[in-house]
Image: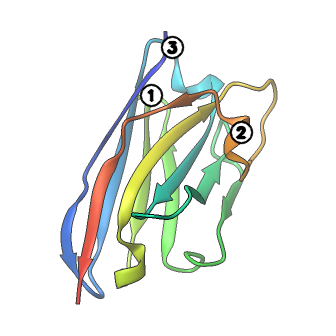
Amino acid sequence: QVQLVESGGGVVQTGGSLRLSCAVSGRAARIYNMGWFRQSPGKERDFVASISQLGGSEFFADSVKGRFTMSRDNARNTVYLQMNSLKAEDTAVYYCAADDAPGSRTEDNEGSYEYWGRGTQVTVSS
């Protein structure tokens, strides 16, 4: 059974930075394409970023492009989301997700992800 545990959320001022981590356990992280999604109160869960199995490809939502980066350390079974120049509209619960489809890909459709963490809260105060 794969488990994903997010950490690194918190409260930060507008313009600040945070780095989220997602620890993968149960199976090796390298077999999964990984994604980050977020959900604000009263809104649907939205795609944020995705990274392929070995980190060769990344894909970002337009709303975070140029501000967020995604990386992975398969030796540590951990995936990261570096968030810079944070805005109030980035406030949300951030979820890590794993896609176990064969082959390396990036994916923005949450239906493609089989495993999910419980989320970590990010609050950006103005």
Q: Position of residue 80 (x, y in %)?
A: 42, 50
In the foreground, 5 or 76: 5
Tell me: 112 left or right of 123. Answer: right
In the foreground, 78 or 89: 89
Q: Residue furthest right?
A: 103
The secondary element bearing badge 3 is classed as loop
Label 3 or label 1, whichever comes before in sequence order: 3
Q: Position of residue 6 (x, y in %)?
A: 33, 41
Tell me: 100 left or right of 10. Answer: right
Q: Amino acid at mark 2?
A: Gly
Residue under numbered circle 2:
111
Above or below, 48 relative to 104: below
Q: Position of residue 36 (x, y in %)?
A: 52, 51
Residue under numbered circle 3:
27
Q: Position of residue 67 (x, y in %)?
A: 49, 78
Of circles 3 and 1, which is in front? 3
Label 2 or label 3, whichever comes before in sequence order: 3
Quadrant position of the C terminus in the picture: bottom left
Residue under numbered circle 1:
75
Of circles 2 and 3, which is in front? 2
Could you say which quadrant of the image residue 104 lies in? Answer: top right
Residue found 27% across the figure and 87% down from its top: 14
Q: How many marks?
A: 3
The secondary element bearing badge 1 is classed as loop
Residue found 63% across the figure and 29% down from its top: 32
Q: From mark 2 to mark 3, how far is it between C-alphas?
A: 21 Å
Could you say which quadrant of the image residue 9 lies in? Answer: bottom left
In the foreground, 92 or 42: 42
